[in-house]
Amino acid sequence: MLDRCKLIIELQHVADKLFVDSTPSYHLAQDIWQLIIGDSTFLYKVREVHNAPWPVPLWQGNLGDIIPVEMIPNKSYVVLSVDGSQIYPDRHNILSCFLINTGSVVLPYGIENKRVQLFSDPTVFAGVDEHQQSFTTDGVNCKRQELELRAGLDLGKQIKKEYGSAVSSIVLFDGSLIFWHLSSKEIAVRDQFLNAYLALLDELYQEKIPVAWYISMPKSKELMSLVRLYLCNFDHQKKELYAPVDAVIDSGIMYSMLEPHTRSIVFSNHSSISHYYPRHLRPFFFYIHTGNEIGRVEIPSWIACDEQMVDMIASVVIDQCIKGGGYPVALAEAHEQAVVKGPDREFFYHFLQKMSIDRKYTVSVSRKSIKKRGIGI
Protein backbone atom coordinates (compact mmCIF):
# COMPACT_ATOMS: atom_id res chain seq x y z
CA MET A 1 0.00 0.00 0.00
CA LEU A 2 1.27 3.44 -0.91
CA ASP A 3 1.85 5.76 2.05
CA ARG A 4 0.50 9.01 0.56
CA CYS A 5 1.82 11.22 3.34
CA LYS A 6 5.36 9.98 2.74
CA LEU A 7 4.83 10.29 -1.01
CA ILE A 8 3.97 13.99 -0.68
CA ILE A 9 7.19 14.56 1.25
CA GLU A 10 9.21 12.68 -1.41
CA LEU A 11 7.65 14.71 -4.23
CA GLN A 12 8.48 17.94 -2.43
CA HIS A 13 12.11 16.81 -2.15
CA VAL A 14 12.42 16.48 -5.94
CA ALA A 15 10.22 19.45 -6.87
CA ASP A 16 13.20 21.57 -7.95
CA LYS A 17 14.24 18.87 -10.41
CA LEU A 18 10.70 18.35 -11.70
CA PHE A 19 9.79 21.98 -12.27
CA VAL A 20 12.79 23.51 -13.98
CA ASP A 21 12.35 26.75 -15.89
CA SER A 22 13.67 25.83 -19.33
CA THR A 23 12.42 29.00 -21.04
CA PRO A 24 15.92 30.45 -21.61
CA SER A 25 17.07 27.18 -23.23
CA TYR A 26 14.08 27.13 -25.57
CA HIS A 27 14.58 30.78 -26.51
CA LEU A 28 18.24 30.08 -27.29
CA ALA A 29 17.34 27.05 -29.44
CA GLN A 30 14.71 29.04 -31.33
CA ASP A 31 17.15 31.90 -31.97
CA ILE A 32 19.80 29.48 -33.25
CA TRP A 33 17.21 27.84 -35.49
CA GLN A 34 16.50 31.19 -37.14
CA LEU A 35 20.23 31.63 -37.76
CA ILE A 36 20.42 28.17 -39.28
CA ILE A 37 17.50 28.91 -41.58
CA GLY A 38 19.32 32.00 -42.85
CA ASP A 39 22.60 30.15 -43.49
CA SER A 40 22.62 28.99 -47.12
CA THR A 41 25.78 26.92 -46.54
CA PHE A 42 24.53 25.05 -43.49
CA LEU A 43 23.27 21.95 -45.33
CA TYR A 44 26.63 21.50 -47.05
CA LYS A 45 28.36 21.62 -43.67
CA VAL A 46 25.93 19.10 -42.21
CA ARG A 47 26.59 16.67 -45.06
CA GLU A 48 30.26 16.63 -44.03
CA VAL A 49 29.47 15.57 -40.47
CA HIS A 50 30.51 12.03 -39.54
CA ASN A 51 30.35 10.06 -36.28
CA ALA A 52 28.07 12.51 -34.50
CA PRO A 53 26.83 11.09 -31.17
CA TRP A 54 23.19 11.70 -32.18
CA PRO A 55 21.18 11.19 -35.38
CA VAL A 56 21.65 14.15 -37.74
CA PRO A 57 18.81 14.58 -40.26
CA LEU A 58 19.12 15.74 -43.85
CA TRP A 59 16.60 17.54 -46.04
CA GLN A 60 15.91 19.05 -49.42
CA GLY A 61 14.59 22.53 -50.12
CA ASN A 62 14.37 25.42 -47.69
CA LEU A 63 14.70 24.46 -44.05
CA GLY A 64 12.39 27.25 -42.92
CA ASP A 65 9.50 26.47 -45.28
CA ILE A 66 6.11 26.20 -43.60
CA ILE A 67 3.60 24.22 -45.65
CA PRO A 68 -0.16 24.77 -45.17
CA VAL A 69 -2.15 21.55 -44.84
CA GLU A 70 -5.26 21.49 -47.02
CA MET A 71 -8.45 20.59 -45.20
CA ILE A 72 -10.56 17.75 -46.64
CA PRO A 73 -14.04 18.09 -45.11
CA ASN A 74 -15.85 17.10 -48.32
CA LYS A 75 -13.39 14.57 -49.74
CA SER A 76 -14.01 10.85 -49.53
CA TYR A 77 -11.33 8.75 -47.90
CA VAL A 78 -10.84 5.66 -45.77
CA VAL A 79 -8.49 5.50 -42.81
CA LEU A 80 -7.40 2.18 -41.34
CA SER A 81 -5.64 1.81 -38.05
CA VAL A 82 -4.11 -1.02 -36.04
CA ASP A 83 -2.90 -1.21 -32.47
CA GLY A 84 -1.84 -4.02 -30.18
CA SER A 85 -1.90 -4.97 -26.52
CA GLN A 86 -0.58 -7.98 -24.65
CA ILE A 87 -0.56 -10.19 -21.61
CA TYR A 88 3.06 -10.93 -20.85
CA PRO A 89 4.18 -14.39 -19.71
CA ASP A 90 3.71 -14.96 -16.00
CA ARG A 91 6.97 -16.32 -14.67
CA HIS A 92 5.12 -17.47 -11.54
CA ASN A 93 3.00 -19.85 -13.64
CA ILE A 94 4.42 -23.08 -15.07
CA LEU A 95 2.27 -22.69 -18.21
CA SER A 96 4.51 -20.63 -20.46
CA CYS A 97 2.45 -18.60 -22.91
CA PHE A 98 1.46 -15.07 -23.76
CA LEU A 99 -1.35 -13.24 -25.52
CA ILE A 100 -1.22 -10.48 -28.13
CA ASN A 101 -4.51 -8.78 -28.93
CA THR A 102 -4.61 -6.83 -32.20
CA GLY A 103 -7.28 -4.16 -32.62
CA SER A 104 -8.16 -2.76 -36.03
CA VAL A 105 -10.63 -0.21 -37.38
CA VAL A 106 -11.87 0.88 -40.80
CA LEU A 107 -13.35 4.38 -40.88
CA PRO A 108 -14.87 5.42 -44.25
CA TYR A 109 -15.76 9.09 -44.82
CA GLY A 110 -18.03 10.49 -47.53
CA ILE A 111 -18.72 7.05 -49.03
CA GLU A 112 -22.29 5.80 -49.36
CA ASN A 113 -23.30 2.37 -48.10
CA LYS A 114 -20.01 1.83 -46.31
CA ARG A 115 -19.92 1.35 -42.57
CA VAL A 116 -17.36 1.45 -39.78
CA GLN A 117 -15.64 -1.87 -39.17
CA LEU A 118 -14.10 -2.88 -35.84
CA PHE A 119 -11.92 -5.93 -35.22
CA SER A 120 -10.29 -7.53 -32.20
CA ASP A 121 -8.09 -10.56 -32.87
CA PRO A 122 -6.36 -12.41 -29.98
CA THR A 123 -3.36 -14.61 -30.73
CA VAL A 124 -1.88 -16.93 -28.09
CA PHE A 125 1.75 -18.03 -28.30
CA ALA A 126 3.02 -21.12 -26.51
CA GLY A 127 6.30 -22.98 -26.64
CA VAL A 128 9.72 -21.45 -27.23
CA ASP A 129 11.11 -19.94 -30.43
CA GLU A 130 14.60 -20.61 -31.77
CA HIS A 131 16.05 -17.47 -30.19
CA GLN A 132 14.30 -17.89 -26.82
CA GLN A 133 13.03 -14.33 -27.25
CA SER A 134 9.26 -14.69 -27.42
CA PHE A 135 9.04 -15.11 -23.67
CA THR A 136 10.89 -11.97 -22.68
CA THR A 137 9.17 -8.60 -22.41
CA ASP A 138 11.22 -7.28 -25.32
CA GLY A 139 10.42 -10.37 -27.39
CA VAL A 140 6.69 -9.99 -26.80
CA ASN A 141 6.84 -6.30 -27.71
CA CYS A 142 8.72 -7.09 -30.94
CA LYS A 143 6.23 -9.81 -31.85
CA ARG A 144 3.33 -7.45 -31.17
CA GLN A 145 4.76 -4.87 -33.58
CA GLU A 146 5.17 -7.59 -36.21
CA LEU A 147 1.51 -8.62 -35.79
CA GLU A 148 0.40 -4.98 -36.02
CA LEU A 149 2.23 -4.59 -39.34
CA ARG A 150 0.77 -7.86 -40.62
CA ALA A 151 -2.76 -6.78 -39.63
CA GLY A 152 -2.27 -3.39 -41.30
CA LEU A 153 -1.07 -5.05 -44.50
CA ASP A 154 -3.95 -7.55 -44.60
CA LEU A 155 -6.50 -4.83 -43.87
CA GLY A 156 -4.97 -2.54 -46.49
CA LYS A 157 -5.24 -5.28 -49.13
CA GLN A 158 -8.85 -5.98 -48.16
CA ILE A 159 -9.90 -2.33 -48.36
CA LYS A 160 -8.02 -1.79 -51.62
CA LYS A 161 -9.94 -4.70 -53.13
CA GLU A 162 -13.28 -3.61 -51.64
CA TYR A 163 -13.08 0.12 -52.43
CA GLY A 164 -10.89 0.14 -55.53
CA SER A 165 -8.38 2.81 -56.48
CA ALA A 166 -10.97 5.60 -56.81
CA VAL A 167 -11.02 6.20 -53.02
CA SER A 168 -7.96 7.41 -51.10
CA SER A 169 -7.01 5.19 -48.18
CA ILE A 170 -4.25 5.25 -45.59
CA VAL A 171 -3.06 2.83 -42.91
CA LEU A 172 -2.20 4.79 -39.78
CA PHE A 173 -0.11 3.34 -36.95
CA ASP A 174 0.65 4.72 -33.51
CA GLY A 175 4.34 5.09 -32.71
CA SER A 176 7.46 5.06 -34.83
CA LEU A 177 8.52 3.60 -38.17
CA ILE A 178 12.08 3.74 -36.82
CA PHE A 179 12.65 0.51 -34.92
CA TRP A 180 14.76 2.12 -32.19
CA HIS A 181 14.22 -0.79 -29.83
CA LEU A 182 16.23 -3.13 -32.07
CA SER A 183 19.40 -1.02 -32.02
CA SER A 184 20.67 -2.49 -28.77
CA LYS A 185 19.58 -6.08 -29.38
CA GLU A 186 21.90 -8.98 -30.18
CA ILE A 187 22.53 -9.39 -33.90
CA ALA A 188 20.48 -12.60 -34.22
CA VAL A 189 17.48 -11.04 -32.47
CA ARG A 190 17.78 -7.79 -34.36
CA ASP A 191 17.93 -9.56 -37.70
CA GLN A 192 15.06 -11.89 -36.85
CA PHE A 193 12.57 -9.13 -36.14
CA LEU A 194 13.97 -6.47 -38.45
CA ASN A 195 13.81 -8.82 -41.44
CA ALA A 196 10.19 -9.66 -40.58
CA TYR A 197 9.29 -5.97 -40.22
CA LEU A 198 11.00 -4.96 -43.44
CA ALA A 199 9.38 -7.80 -45.39
CA LEU A 200 5.95 -6.52 -44.31
CA LEU A 201 6.87 -2.92 -45.10
CA ASP A 202 8.02 -4.05 -48.52
CA GLU A 203 4.68 -5.76 -49.13
CA LEU A 204 2.93 -2.48 -48.28
CA TYR A 205 5.20 -0.84 -50.85
CA GLN A 206 4.53 -3.49 -53.49
CA GLU A 207 0.79 -3.07 -52.94
CA LYS A 208 1.20 0.72 -53.02
CA ILE A 209 -0.77 1.06 -49.79
CA PRO A 210 -0.15 4.51 -48.23
CA VAL A 211 1.06 4.13 -44.66
CA ALA A 212 2.18 6.51 -41.90
CA TRP A 213 3.10 6.48 -38.21
CA TYR A 214 1.85 9.23 -35.87
CA ILE A 215 3.61 10.19 -32.64
CA SER A 216 1.74 12.38 -30.16
CA MET A 217 3.87 14.70 -28.00
CA PRO A 218 7.14 13.52 -29.60
CA LYS A 219 10.31 13.76 -27.53
CA SER A 220 12.63 13.55 -30.55
CA LYS A 221 15.76 15.69 -30.75
CA GLU A 222 16.84 15.23 -34.36
CA LEU A 223 16.36 18.88 -35.32
CA MET A 224 18.09 19.80 -32.10
CA SER A 225 21.12 17.93 -33.46
CA LEU A 226 21.38 20.74 -36.01
CA VAL A 227 21.22 23.35 -33.24
CA ARG A 228 23.94 21.53 -31.31
CA LEU A 229 26.17 21.40 -34.38
CA TYR A 230 25.76 25.14 -34.90
CA LEU A 231 26.54 25.93 -31.26
CA CYS A 232 29.71 23.85 -31.20
CA ASN A 233 30.76 24.91 -34.70
CA PHE A 234 30.52 21.28 -35.88
CA ASP A 235 32.96 20.03 -33.24
CA HIS A 236 30.63 17.75 -31.26
CA GLN A 237 33.42 16.96 -28.78
CA LYS A 238 32.87 20.41 -27.24
CA LYS A 239 29.87 19.36 -25.22
CA GLU A 240 29.96 22.42 -23.00
CA LEU A 241 29.00 24.64 -25.96
CA TYR A 242 25.66 22.92 -26.57
CA ALA A 243 24.95 21.86 -22.98
CA PRO A 244 22.52 24.80 -22.47
CA VAL A 245 20.07 23.26 -24.98
CA ASP A 246 20.44 19.59 -23.99
CA ALA A 247 16.93 19.51 -22.50
CA VAL A 248 15.22 21.10 -25.52
CA ILE A 249 13.23 18.85 -27.87
CA ASP A 250 12.25 19.37 -31.50
CA SER A 251 8.67 20.36 -30.73
CA GLY A 252 10.01 23.41 -28.87
CA ILE A 253 11.40 24.69 -32.17
CA MET A 254 8.31 23.69 -34.14
CA TYR A 255 5.94 25.51 -31.77
CA SER A 256 7.75 28.73 -32.62
CA MET A 257 7.56 28.03 -36.37
CA LEU A 258 4.30 26.30 -37.19
CA GLU A 259 0.82 27.76 -37.11
CA PRO A 260 -2.17 25.43 -36.59
CA HIS A 261 -2.77 23.14 -39.58
CA THR A 262 0.66 23.61 -41.12
CA ARG A 263 3.63 21.27 -41.37
CA SER A 264 7.39 21.33 -41.75
CA ILE A 265 9.35 20.07 -44.72
CA VAL A 266 10.24 16.38 -44.84
CA PHE A 267 13.49 15.20 -43.21
CA SER A 268 15.39 11.93 -43.65
CA ASN A 269 16.33 10.00 -40.52
CA HIS A 270 19.92 8.79 -40.17
CA SER A 271 19.88 6.76 -36.97
CA SER A 272 22.10 3.68 -36.94
CA ILE A 273 19.15 1.28 -37.28
CA SER A 274 17.84 3.10 -40.38
CA HIS A 275 20.91 2.02 -42.36
CA TYR A 276 19.55 -1.55 -42.36
CA TYR A 277 16.41 -0.43 -44.23
CA PRO A 278 16.34 -0.84 -48.03
CA ARG A 279 16.51 2.51 -49.82
CA HIS A 280 12.80 2.64 -50.69
CA LEU A 281 11.84 1.94 -47.06
CA ARG A 282 14.23 4.36 -45.31
CA PRO A 283 12.39 6.39 -42.64
CA PHE A 284 11.52 10.06 -43.21
CA PHE A 285 9.55 12.39 -40.97
CA PHE A 286 7.88 15.77 -40.70
CA TYR A 287 6.31 17.76 -37.89
CA ILE A 288 2.72 18.91 -38.03
CA HIS A 289 0.66 21.37 -35.96
CA THR A 290 -2.67 19.61 -35.45
CA GLY A 291 -4.31 22.61 -33.81
CA ASN A 292 -3.79 21.07 -30.37
CA GLU A 293 -0.19 19.89 -30.38
CA ILE A 294 2.93 19.36 -32.44
CA GLY A 295 2.79 15.82 -33.78
CA ARG A 296 5.43 13.85 -35.65
CA VAL A 297 4.53 11.87 -38.76
CA GLU A 298 6.92 9.20 -40.05
CA ILE A 299 6.77 7.74 -43.55
CA PRO A 300 8.93 5.45 -45.71
CA SER A 301 11.07 6.86 -48.51
CA TRP A 302 8.78 5.80 -51.35
CA ILE A 303 6.03 7.98 -49.88
CA ALA A 304 8.35 10.84 -48.90
CA CYS A 305 9.35 11.16 -52.58
CA ASP A 306 5.72 11.67 -53.63
CA GLU A 307 4.67 15.21 -52.66
CA GLN A 308 0.99 14.59 -53.37
CA MET A 309 0.97 11.54 -51.13
CA VAL A 310 2.71 13.45 -48.33
CA ASP A 311 0.10 16.21 -48.63
CA MET A 312 -2.71 13.63 -48.53
CA ILE A 313 -1.31 11.98 -45.41
CA ALA A 314 -0.91 15.36 -43.67
CA SER A 315 -4.51 16.27 -44.56
CA VAL A 316 -5.83 12.96 -43.22
CA VAL A 317 -3.85 13.35 -39.97
CA ILE A 318 -5.25 16.86 -39.42
CA ASP A 319 -8.81 15.70 -40.23
CA GLN A 320 -8.45 12.74 -37.89
CA CYS A 321 -7.16 14.98 -35.08
CA ILE A 322 -10.09 17.36 -35.54
CA LYS A 323 -12.55 14.47 -35.44
CA GLY A 324 -10.76 12.94 -32.45
CA GLY A 325 -10.55 16.09 -30.32
CA GLY A 326 -6.80 16.51 -30.79
CA TYR A 327 -5.70 12.90 -31.39
CA PRO A 328 -6.42 10.80 -34.51
CA VAL A 329 -9.77 9.14 -33.91
CA ALA A 330 -8.74 6.02 -35.84
CA LEU A 331 -5.76 5.45 -33.51
CA ALA A 332 -7.94 5.97 -30.43
CA GLU A 333 -10.55 3.48 -31.70
CA ALA A 334 -7.91 0.90 -32.62
CA HIS A 335 -6.49 1.18 -29.11
CA GLU A 336 -9.95 0.60 -27.62
CA GLN A 337 -10.28 -2.58 -29.69
CA ALA A 338 -6.82 -3.78 -28.69
CA VAL A 339 -6.59 -2.94 -25.00
CA VAL A 340 -6.58 -5.87 -22.57
CA LYS A 341 -8.11 -4.78 -19.27
CA GLY A 342 -7.85 -6.28 -15.81
CA PRO A 343 -10.97 -8.50 -16.07
CA ASP A 344 -9.75 -9.78 -19.46
CA ARG A 345 -6.43 -10.72 -17.89
CA GLU A 346 -8.20 -12.56 -15.06
CA PHE A 347 -10.38 -14.40 -17.58
CA PHE A 348 -7.28 -15.43 -19.53
CA TYR A 349 -5.64 -17.03 -16.51
CA HIS A 350 -8.93 -18.44 -15.20
CA PHE A 351 -9.58 -20.24 -18.50
CA LEU A 352 -6.00 -21.56 -18.56
CA GLN A 353 -6.68 -23.02 -15.13
CA LYS A 354 -9.98 -24.53 -16.32
CA MET A 355 -8.27 -26.10 -19.35
CA SER A 356 -5.63 -27.63 -17.12
CA ILE A 357 -8.31 -29.21 -14.91
CA ASP A 358 -10.24 -30.54 -17.92
CA ARG A 359 -7.05 -32.13 -19.22
CA LYS A 360 -6.05 -33.42 -15.79
CA TYR A 361 -2.86 -31.38 -15.95
CA THR A 362 -1.36 -30.10 -12.72
CA VAL A 363 -0.54 -26.41 -12.98
CA SER A 364 2.06 -25.10 -10.57
CA VAL A 365 1.80 -21.48 -9.48
CA SER A 366 4.41 -19.84 -7.28
CA ARG A 367 3.50 -19.16 -3.66
CA LYS A 368 4.34 -15.51 -4.27
CA SER A 369 1.67 -15.27 -6.96
CA ILE A 370 -0.91 -16.95 -4.73
CA LYS A 371 -0.02 -14.66 -1.84
CA LYS A 372 -0.34 -11.50 -3.99
CA ARG A 373 -3.90 -12.49 -4.96
CA GLY A 374 -5.03 -12.71 -1.37
CA ILE A 375 -2.95 -11.39 1.50
CA GLY A 376 -3.92 -12.55 4.95
CA ILE A 377 -2.71 -11.28 8.28
Image: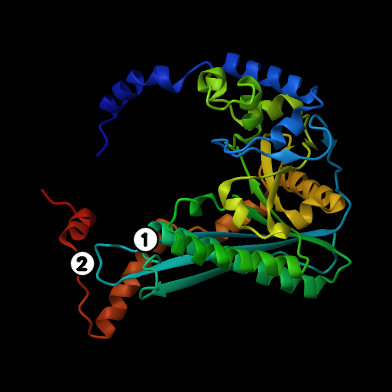
Image quadrant where one finds the N terminus: top left
Instruction: Indicate which disc residue 365 carries.
Output: 2
Q: Give the residue type at disc 1.
A: Thr
Measure the C-alpha gap from mark 1 to mark 2: 19 Å
Callout 1 environment at 10 Å: few (<14), some (14 to 19), or many (20+)? some
**Closer to the camera in the image, 77 or 154:** 154
Indicate how the structure is coloured in the image: rainbow
Q: Do the residues labelled 1 and 2 touch (CB within 8 Å)?
A: no
Residue 8 shows up from this direction: yes
Residue 150 placement: quadrant = bottom right
The picture places residue 244, in percent across and down from the top left corner, at: 54, 18
Give the secondary structure at mark 2: loop
The picture places residue 360, in percent across and down from the top left corner, at: 22, 85
**Closer to the camera in the image, 216 or 201:** 201
Mark 1 vs mark 2: in front: 1
Instruction: Indicate which disc residue 136 carries.
Output: 1
Residue 269 placement: quadrant = top right
Q: Give the residue type at disc 2.
A: Val
Q: Which residue is drawn at 50% across and 67% down?
A: 192
Give the secondary structure at mark 1: loop
Ranked by sequence position, the earlier of labels 1 and 2 is 1
Q: Is residue 178 left or right of residue 312?
A: left
Instruction: Indicate which disc residue 70 carries.
Output: none
